[in-house]
Image (cartoon, rainbow, N blue to C red):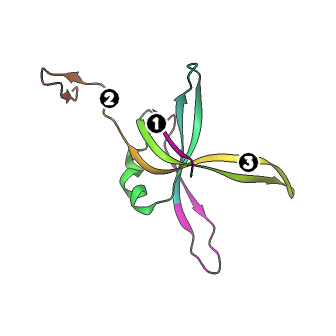
Amino acid sequence: MNSRFFTGYLPVDAAEAYTPATATAPALRKLVFDVVIKDSAGNEFPEKCMIEDPALIVAAEELLTAGRAVVCEGEQTARPLHERGVLKGYTRRVLIKRIEFPQRGGKKTQNEKVEASA
């Protein structure tokens, strides 16, 4: 398992996606979104992310909005990309296992607690 931990922000809202239903399994709902992160040279790039856990989808769906800062923990995955029956490469995604939404902005008091600005 290739675990990833990273922070960044969402450039656009998360979108719903579904895995197709089969004869033995129903369609499964998931959320897909990009997180813009910086590398060690300071260059920004989007990391494609996906949430498949139903409980995590319910908890995070309303918070995955454009401009929101996130801290993500997940597993790096790669899926084959076929075009006309020929393998063209692989698409990388991070399968999110845990996500947090840090509070940004606000003023700090003497006790170092963050207060939301009005």
Instruction: Point out which mark residue 66 bears.
Output: 1
Q: Are marks 1 and 2 in contact (CB under 8 Å)?
A: no
Instruction: Point out which mark residue 90 bears.
Output: 3
Give the magenta-colored segment's residue range: 1-29
6 vs 19, left or right, is left
Q: Residue at x 33, y 35 (%)?
A: 102
**Horizontal and vertical percent position of residue 34:** 55, 40
Q: Amino acid at mark 3?
A: Tyr
Query: Closer to the N terminus: mark 1 or mark 3?
Result: 1
Secondary structure found at label 1? loop
Q: Quadrant of residue 114?
A: top left
Task: Tell me if mark 2 has few (under 14), some (14-19) or many (20+) residues whose alpha carbon lies within 10 angstroms of its own.
Answer: few
Task: Tell me if mark 1 has few (under 14), some (14-19) or many (20+) residues whose alpha carbon lies within 10 angstroms of its own.
Answer: some
Q: Quadrant of residue 116?
A: top left
Q: Residue at x 57, y 47 (%)?
A: 2
Q: Amino acid at mark 2?
A: Arg
**Horizontal and vertical percent position of residue 18:** 58, 62
**In whole angstroms, how far apart are the C-alphas of marks 1 and 2?**
14 Å
Q: Nearer the viewer, mark 1 or mark 3?
A: 3
Secondary structure found at label 2? loop
* Residue labelled with disc 2: 104
Q: Are marks 1 and 3 in contact (CB under 8 Å)?
A: no
In the image, residue 35 sits, relative to residue 1, either above or below, namely above
Secondary structure found at label 3? strand
**In whole angstroms, how far apart are the C-alphas of marks 3 and 2?**
35 Å
